[in-house]
Amino acid sequence: MTWPTPAPLFNPLVAAEPPRPDELWAGPFGLLAFLPLIPVVLLLARWRRRTALILGSLAWLLPTLRPATTVILLAGLAAGWGWLHLLTVLRRRGKLSERWMLTLVWVGLHALAFPLWWHAHPGWYPSRLAALHNVGFAYFLLRFVAWGVELARNPRTANRFWDTVCWLLYPPCMRLGPVLLRGEFLTRLDAWDPRGSPAWKEGGKRLGLFLLGGISLGVIGARLLPTRGDFFAEPQNYTSAELLRLCYLIPVQIYLLLWTYNQLALTIGHWLGLPVDNNFCRLPLATSVREFWRRWHITVGGWLRNYLYIPLGGSRRRATLNTLLTFGYCGLWHGPSWSFLAWALAQAGALLVQRAWDRVTARRLDTGECSGRFQRGWTFVCWLLTMHFAIATILVFADFEHLGSRIAMELWRRL
């Protein structure tokens, strides 16, 4: 038996034909279609909160994903739920130890997600973009693993089916995060009062930021159109000024995509009365790689720390190996591309270098060698280095075929 060859990852940055409107609706920004459903959900929720959430989610999924993709999504979620339910029953009966259940949680859920990681979807998904992240399966995987860990540790935890359905199908958390864990979501669901006044002002502020991000993405996208071929593969066809513009604008565009979606998710959470967590916190102010990761995709970073880095031993033992394994997983979680893995390991390497550097600077601060003026100047230098490191590594991330090497070599040759 031969394993099917996967289709190449679609890279919208260099595609001759940009994503079509139906492809965009099938992705994260299809969340826009849920906005007009909010008043209906709030009205129905006055009588049946969980029913209103589930019906509203299905009414949004069907037109944006189409029926075939919706069925596959729901079947995948049912399979994940069934696997955890089976393991929990065995754990309650004493057939599984906590360690064995944790192992089977990780192995089983990743086995279910693997076909999508392999990104072969012949006809069932109406988009050229990989379904793993565009639909949100990657984020479902993180949420299921966290829930499975909780059940392994506390198998007697109440597991009401419809609560789980509401949690999994809550639209602001489905396609691109944030990673809202089941217990926290149910706490907010129990406190939800659909008869109360939604946070219109805060939601309006977030919607304004979403619109600002959307306009910025449109302007940047117009500047990035590949007019003379794939700029990752053929940088020699572009002037030095054009290449430098691409090197700066591509990372900004990727950040704005995530940040803009985050504002939309926050908008819906505020207006519906079931808030979600902020995934980005003033990222451009980061002055170190560690601080960058405290501000970038906060809930994913928290998941990696709590469910991978700390269980591996954290900083108590084998800190270097644990950091490499955690970020290696993060890279593979994004999909089957060497660019993702190279980006992730670069982040790990930078964090390890910073950890060693912090030990040196801590000694200097203790001895009073650094003046206030020096510290302010050094903070600016650190900010500059952090931003350019992020720009360089995100460029590697975005170049699926060449890891940014051809652009880098071309710029170096010209210099």
Image (spheres, helix red, strand yellow):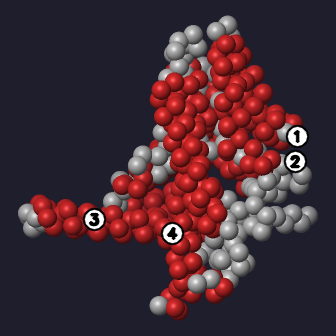
Report the amino acid beneath label 4. Answer: Tyr
Report the amino acid beneath label 2. Answer: Trp
User: According to the image, label 2 marks what residue?
Assistant: 124
Q: Is residue 285 left or right of residue 37?
A: left
Residue 160 visible in the shown view: no
How packed mark 3 is, by other alpha carbons closer than 10 Å (few <14, some 14-19, many 20 or more), is few
Residue in the picture at 48% in, 39% down: 278
What separation in Å lies between label 3 and label 1 (alpha carbons)? 52 Å
User: According to the image, label 4 marks what residue?
Assistant: 248
Report the amino acid beneath label 1. Answer: Ala
Residue 41 visible in the shown view: yes
Residue in the picture at 58% in, 38% down: 264
**Are the residues tagged 1 and 2 within 8 Å (C-beta)?**
yes
* Residue 141 in picture, x, y percent from top left: 65, 43
**Are the residues tagged 4 and 2 within 8 Å (C-beta)?**
no
Mark nearer the N terminus (1 vs 4): 1
